[in-house]
Image (tube, grey):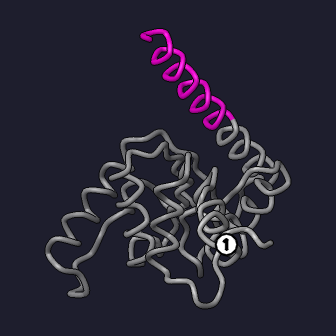
């Protein structure tokens, strides 16, 4: 007998790493390579073009993946802040207080600005600007795609993500132990 659809969906929504990226800037470079690297390590990354299929509701699938993820990798690139989807992902990661690892890909923190081009409501604009400013508070990796060492970039990002996942797991274990010791 096949497994129940709801159990299958719940398993699909769990991911270790959510990769937030602007497609035209990094889908076939940084984001795609990190996804492949994480898969090789048997992590469960969420990468839109690999984790979603035709018929999936974009915001539902992405929202569930963010809520269920442990770590968010934010690949800030030249067009990141002009993408509604990227800004929505960033805001949701910040609102959910997820551990985030920002990467400045061919940009500096000072380049990250949400421009009011008339496409956002006042509330969305406020939310997105808040999320960008929050993300700037985190220590980030930087990479220049024209002159950077790709192998070093992949290895160091990988190491940071794995270390973050281990720390989160240890913290969760401590919370469980402290809860049990109260009983």
Viewer-proximal residue among 45 and 134: 45
Q: Position of residue 80 (x, y in %)?
A: 46, 71
Viewer-proximal residue among 100 and 78: 100
Secondary structure at numbered mark 1: helix
Q: Is residue 114 left or right of residue 5?
A: left
Q: Position of residue 180 (x, y in %)?
A: 50, 16
Above or below for 107 versus 142: below
Q: Position of residue 130 (x, y in %)?
A: 25, 56
Image: magenta residue range: 163-183
Viewer-proximal residue among 83 and 52: 52
Residue 165 within the segment the image draws in magenta: yes
Q: Which residue, given by chain and number where applicable, does mark 1 sit on?
A: 51
Q: Position of residue 82 (x, y in %)?
A: 39, 78
Residue 120's quadrant in the figure?
Answer: bottom left
Quadrant of the rendering where the N terminus is positioned: bottom right
| Residue located farthest toward the right when viewing the structure as drawn | 40
Quadrant of the rendering where the C terminus is positioned: top left
Q: Is residue 176 left or right of residue 44?
A: left
Residue 103 seen: no
Residue 180 within the segment the image draws in magenta: yes
Structural crowding at the residue carrying mark 1, measured as other residues with C-alpha within 10 Å and reported as few (<14), some (14–19) or many (≥20) = some
Q: Is residue 121 left or right of residue 75?
A: left
| Residue located farthest toward the bottom when viewing the structure as drawn | 55
Main SS, magenta region, reads helix
Residue at (58% x, 50% y) in the render: 142
Residue 164 seen: yes
State how many labels appear. 1
């Amino acid at each position: 007998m096949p497994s129940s659809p709801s159990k299958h969906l719940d398993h699909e929504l769990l991911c270790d790493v959510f990769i937030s990226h602007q497609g035209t800037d990094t889908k076939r470079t940084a984001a795609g390579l990190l996804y492949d690297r994480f898969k090789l390590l048997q992590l469960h990354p969420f990468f839109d073009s690999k984790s979603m299929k035709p018929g999936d509701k974009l915001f539902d699938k992405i929202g569930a993946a963010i809520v269920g993820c442990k770590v968010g990798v934010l690949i800030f690139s030249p067009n990141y802040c002009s993408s509604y989807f990227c800004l929505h992902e960033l805001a949701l990661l910040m609102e959910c207080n997820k551990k985030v690892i920002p990467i400045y890909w061919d940009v500096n923190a000072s380049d990250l600005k949400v421009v009011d081009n008339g496409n956002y409501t006042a509330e969305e604009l406020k939310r997105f600007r808040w999320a960008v400013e929050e993300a700037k508070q985190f220590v980030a990796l930087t990479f220049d795609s024209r002159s950077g060492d790709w192998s070093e970039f992949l290895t160091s990002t990988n190491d940071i993500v794995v270390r973050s996942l281990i720390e989160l797991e240890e913290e969760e274990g401590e919370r469980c132990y402290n809860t049990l010791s109260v009983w």
